[in-house]
Amino acid sequence: QVQLVESGGGLVQAGVSLRLSCAASGPTLSIYALGWFRQAPGKEREFVAAIRWSGISTVYADSVKGRFFIFRDNAKNTVSLQMNSLKPEDTAVYYCAADPIMDWPPSRKDSDYDYWGQGTQVTVSS
């Protein structure tokens, strides 16, 4: 099955940038889209961004549009999330997830994603 491993989280100050990466392995041809979700303490997991596995199309949550950018490194089977102008409200555990359903735009419901990474903590201090 598809395996996803996130990296790149950390503790940063508001206003700076951070890049998260998600390395995919296994039968990656079964992936149609790869998404990033986040879960803050006491809140439900929410959709952040997604990219078609081909790298052609992207979609973002309104809360991060214009600040976050998702892109794929085809050679490395890696999808990265470039997070700029970070805010304290971006503090959360960030997860990458794979969606095998051939439908665009992809679902924003976490229950529709089949494979998940272990998550990486992002903490933004004010």
Image (cartoon, helix red, strand yellow):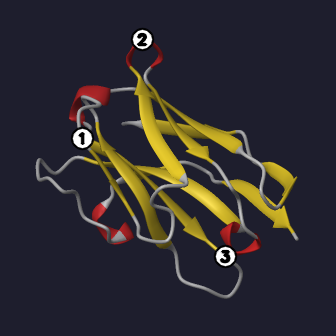
Position of the C terminus, as image quadrant, is bottom right
Sequence-wise, which precedes: disc 3 or disc 1? 3
| Residue 53 position in % (x across, y down) | 28, 34
Check the image and report above or below for 13 versus 109: above
- The kind of residue tagged 1 is Ser
* Labels 3, 1: front one: 1
Distance between mark 2 and mark 1 Cα atoms = 18 Å
- The amino acid type found where label 3 is placed reads Ala
Q: Is residue 18 above or below residue 113?
A: above
Q: Please tell me which residue is depicted at 81% across the width and 63% down the height of the picture.
A: 124
Q: Determine the secondary structure under disc 3.
A: loop
Circle 2 Cα neighbour tier, 10 Å, few/some/many (<14 / 14–19 / ≥20) = few
Q: Earlier in the sequence, mark 2 or mark 3?
A: 3
Q: CA distance from mark 2 to mark 3?
A: 32 Å
Direction from residue 29 to residue 102 in the image, left or right = left
Residue 118 percent coordinates (x, y) = 62, 51
Say which quarter of the image contains residue 89: bottom right
Instruction: Residue 40: name its quadrant.
Output: bottom right
Q: Which residue is mark 3?
A: 40
Q: Which residue is mark 1?
A: 57
Could you say which disc has been placed on residue 75 in the image? 2
Could you say whether the residue bearing mark 2 is in a helix, strand or loop?
Answer: helix
